Image (cartoon, rainbow, N blue to C red):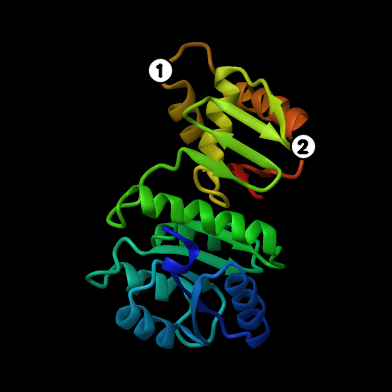
Amino acid sequence: MNNSDYTILLVDDEPDILEFVSYNLKKEEFKVLKASNGAEGLKKAIKEKPHLILLDVMMPGMDGIETCDQIRKTPGLENTLIAFLTARGEDYSQVAGFDAGADDYITKPIKPKVLISRIKALLRRYAQSGGSEVVTENIQDFGILFIDLDKYQVRLKNQKLDLPRKEFELLTLLTSKPGKVFHRDEILDKIWGNEVVVGGRTIDVHIRKLREKIGEKFIKTVKGVGYKFES
């Protein structure tokens, strides 16, 4: 499918954000709908059935979390892609967003190239699933950082990185849901499973090695909780 085949609904109470994001999406030939609050966004989503909804978290009345939750409960919209747009950095809002059924989390100020890259990655998931179910994306494109899960390949600024298996698995776990805080126990379970002689320091060492290779900005530490990936 071409970009022009996809409809994207923007829901934000800030007119400047609506116009800025709409302009950049239209440049890429996406069909764009706009709503200035959660209630209006929900009505337009039900009527228009967009492929993707970009949803602000902080809105008066029905906020983004509640709007997302209502969308997920609406027949025909259960699998619509939803990405939050927000300036909030508090971890609880990110966790709440994913719990409500969000697919991605994009922080403000919005960088057009990053926004478009993330949207295209999400829509590839939609296309691969036939528009019925979101599946794991085999290509993860974060601008300067590119991950091909099938080829077991990572590129940073078009330079190939050689990552040991555990570092690759840890990176792809974190990038599977940008913005989500992965608890240390969850990381240990998913990456190391029942392997013996593996403790919390093992995660720290692998995170340090990843940061040395891809840079400090992508992987954030949430003290006392775990780690998250931000592009």
- Residue at screen point 62% across, 30% down: 154
Q: Which mark is residue 194?
A: 1
Q: Nearer the viewer, residue 215 or 188?
A: 215
Extreme residue in the top direction: 196
Mark 1 is surrounded, within 10 Å at the Cα level, by few (under 14), some (14 to 19) or many (20 or more) other residues, namely few
Q: Which residue is mark 2?
A: 215
Q: Earlier in the sequence, mark 1 or mark 2?
A: 1
Going by the image, does 212 lie left or right of 61? Answer: right
Q: Is residue 221 visible?
A: yes
Does residue 90 sit above or below 57 in this rendering?
Answer: above
Mark 2 is surrounded, within 10 Å at the Cα level, by few (under 14), some (14 to 19) or many (20 or more) other residues, namely few
Q: CA distance from mark 1 to mark 2?
A: 30 Å
Does residue 155 sit above or below 5 in this rendering?
Answer: above
| Element on which disc 1 rests | loop
In the rendered image, residue 106, in percent from the top left (x then y), is placed at 60, 61
Q: Which mark is residue 223?
A: none
In the rendered image, residue 111, in percent from the top left (x then y), is placed at 71, 63
Q: Nearer the viewer, residue 26 or 171?
A: 26
Q: Amino acid at mark 1?
A: Asn
Q: Amino acid at mark 2?
A: Gly
- Residue at screen point 65% across, 79% down: 17
Quarter placement of the N terminus: bottom left
- Residue at screen point 46% across, 60% down: 2
Does residue 145 sit above or below 43 in this rendering?
Answer: above
Q: In the picture, residue 220 is in which quadrant?
A: top right
Q: Is residue 6 visible?
A: no
Q: Mark 1 or 2, which is nearer the eye?
A: 2
